[in-house]
Image: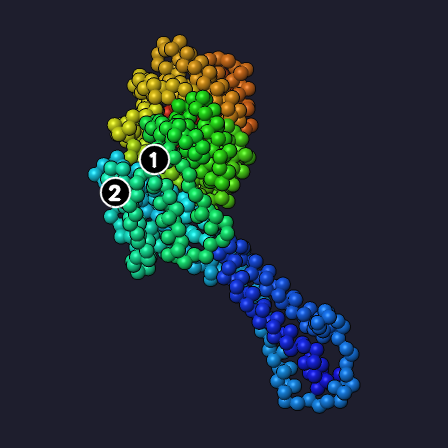
Amino acid sequence: MKLSQLVTELRSRGVYRVAAVYSAAAWALLQTTDVIAPLLGLPDWSVSAVLATAAAGFPIAIALSWFFDLTSEGLVEAPPISETISRSKISFAHVVQLGLIFLLTILVGELYLERLGQQPDTGQLLTSTAEAQRPSIAVMPFVNMSQDVDMEYFGDGLAEEILNLLAKLNELDVAARTSSFYFKDRPEDIRNIGEQLGVAHVLEGSVRHDGTRVRVTAQLIDINNGYHLWSETYDRELDNILSLQDEIAEQVVSALKILLSKESREILAHSTNINPASFDYYLQGRARLREPPDLDSLELARDFFDKSLAADPEFADAYAGLCESLLGLYSIDLDTEKFRQAEDACQSALRLDRRAGSVYIALGNLYTASGQYEQAIEEFETAISIGGGSADAYLGLGVAYFEHNQPKLAEQSYTKSIELQPNYWQAYMSMGNFLFDTGQLEEAIPYFQRVTELMPQSEMALNNLGAVLFFSGDFSAASQYWRESLELAPSSEAFSNVATSLYFSKRYNEAVDFYHKAVEFAPDDCALWGNLGDAYSQLPDSEELAKPMYRNAIKLALERLQINSSDSETLALMGHYQAMLGERDIALEYIDRAVKQAPGSMIVNFNAATALANLGESERSLDMLEKALSLGYPWVLASADGNLEPLKNSPRYAALGDET
C-alpha cells in the first residue's frame, strides 16, 4: 500500500480521531489518578497500573478503529480498501496528519516510560509529589485558663479526643499524642514545636470554665509562616460539649482543604451520643493513665472508668480504659482477679466498637500477659492498621515478639515506636529493657539516660539512674537514687530496688526489712516473696524463716502460671524456689521447662544456675552460669549473689571470673 493510500485510509476510517481522543483521555486519566490516589489511600503502584492499562489499550483501540466503524446501527465491519483512494497522491495535508498520529503515539509512550522511571531504587519506595505534600498536624494540649486547677484534665482530654478523631482520617498525618503532649507547659515557640514534630500545622487552644458553661478557643497555625489559618471561640454548656470535638475537627479539615474519601466523611459525620457525665469521668480516667503507672494513679483511673460506665454502660472507650488500668494494676500486684476483670472489660469494649484501635492494643497486652503471643501479635497488627501506626501498638508488638522468641522483630518494633514518637519516654524505657534482657547492657544505658531527660523530676527517672549504676556494680550509688525515688513515690518497685542493692551489698538484715515493705505494696508478687526468702536464707540460723517465704512464692507463681503457662522467667523462679526447699525432682522439672522455653534468656539461665547450685549440681550449674554470662549477665552481679555461694570454691567458677 502506498503512503498516500495509507494516510487517506487512516483518515477515512477515523483512526486520527480515535488516536487523538484516546491519548487525551489517557493523559487526563493519569493526571486525575496521580492526584486522587494518595487522597484515597491507594498504593503508589496504582497510578502505574492505570497508565500501563492505558498504554496497552492504545494499539488495540487503533486496530479496532481500522477494522470496524461505529454507526447508528452499532459496530460494523469497515469497508475494504478503496481502489479510487489507492490512486490518490500524497499531499502536504497527508504528511501533517500522519505526523500528528506519530506525535500522539510518542506522547503516550513517553508518559509510560516516564512513570516507569519512578520505580523505587534498591527496594526503597519513592513518595509521589501528592503524597509528599500530604497535610500534617500536631494537636497540642488545650491550656486550662480556669481558676480551678483540677480542671486541667478537661483541656488535655478535649485535645486528645480531637487528635484521635483526626488520626482516623487516612488523608491526614497526625503527630502522636505522646509526642505533642511532651511540649505541654514547655516554653517552646509553636513553630519550633512543629519543626521538631515534623508537621506543617499545629492546632492549639484553651478552655475556661464558668459554672456550667465552658469557653473553648481553638486556632490552627501554619508553622512555615506562623500565621493563623483558622481560629474560633465556642461558648457551650458542659452537657453540650461532646459535639464540639467533631466541629473543631471538621473546621481543621476545611481549613486545610483536604479532599476526604467516603469513609473519612463518614467518620467525621458520625454523631457522638455519650452521656456528658460519663464522658467527663472518662476524660479524668484518661488523665490518670497519662501519668507514670504507679498504684495510686491506676487505682484512680479504674475508679473514674467505673463511674463513666455507671453513667453510660455502652461507652466502648471507657471499657478500653478500664481494661488498660486493670492490666496496669495486674502488672504491679499480680492479682489474677484483676487480670480476669481486665479480660471482661476488653471483650465488652470490642463488642461495642470493633473500630477502636485502643481496644486492640488493650487486647494485645492482655494476650501477651496470658502467653497467647501469636494472638497478641495479630491484635497489635490490627491496631496498627486501624490507627495508621501507633507507638503504643508497636511497643506491645515488640513485647509479644520478644516473648515469642523473635528478638530481631522485637527490636524492629521498638525502633519503629521511637521513630513514631521521638519524645515518648515509654519507647526508650522499653528499648532499654529489651537491650538489658538480651545482655546488651552498655547499649541499654543511653536509652535509660534518655528517659531521665524526658522525665527529669519523676521517680521513674531516679529508678533508671539507679538501674544504670546497679548494672555497673555501684550498689551504694544505686541505692542512693532508689531511696530518693522512694521519697517521691513509695512503691513495691522502689522498695524492692533498695532491698536488692542492700542484698548485693551483703547487708541482708536491711534487705529483709525493705523486701517486707515491698511485699506490703504488692502482696501477690511471687518474685518479692522469693527475694524475701533469698534474703532470709543468707542470714545465720534463719533457714526456717526462709521456707514459708518460698512456699508463698510458689503458691503465687502457680497462680501466675495458670494465666501464662509459658512464662519462662516464672518457670525458672519456680525451679529456684523448689530447689531452696530441697524439692529436687520438681525443681529440675521446672528448670528444664524454663530453659527449653527460653534458651536465649540470660535471666532464665542465671536462675537455673542458682537452683542447680543449691541442689549440688555444680557442673551443670556452672554450665548455666557460663551461658548466662555469655548472654550478657554481668559478672559483677553474679559474683555478688549469695545464691551461688556453693560454687565459690570451684576453680572453674574462679576461671569464669578471670575470663570476664
Whether 144 is drawn above or below 557: the answer is below
**Quarter occupied by the N terminus:** bottom right
Q: Can residue 346 be seen in this view?
A: yes
Cβ atoms at labels 2 and 1 below 8 Å apart? no
Please provide percent x and percent y for residue 471: 36, 33
Whether 118 is drawn above or below 110: the answer is above
Residue topped by disc 1: 280
Q: Which residue is drawn at 54% across and 38% down?
A: 378
Local crowd size for mark 2, using a 10 Å CA cut-off: few (<14), some (14–19), many (≥20): many
Q: Residue at x 46, y 40 (%)?
A: 357
Q: Residue at x 55, y 28 (%)?
A: 596
Of pointers 2 and 1, the one earlier in the residue sequence: 2
> Horizontally, is 654 left or right of 584 in the view?
left
Whether 161 is drawn above or below 91: the answer is above
Q: Residue at x 63, y 63 (%)?
A: 53
Q: Is residue 223 visible?
A: no
Please provide percent x and percent y for residue 574: 48, 20
Q: What separation in Å lies between label 2 and label 1 (alpha carbons)? A: 15 Å
Residue topped by disc 2: 208
Name the amino acid type tagged 1. Asp
Please provide percent x and percent y for residue 452: 31, 39
Q: Which of 323 and 273 is in front in this view?
A: 273
Residue lying at the far front in this picture: please name it: 72
Local crowd size for mark 1, using a 10 Å CA cut-off: few (<14), some (14–19), many (≥20): many
In this figure, what is the number of numbered marks? 2
**Quarter occupied by the C terminus:** top left
Image quadrant assignment for residue 416: top left
Q: Nearer the viewer, residue 159 or 43?
A: 159
Q: Is mark 2 on a helix, strand or loop?
A: strand
Name the amino acid type tagged 2. Arg
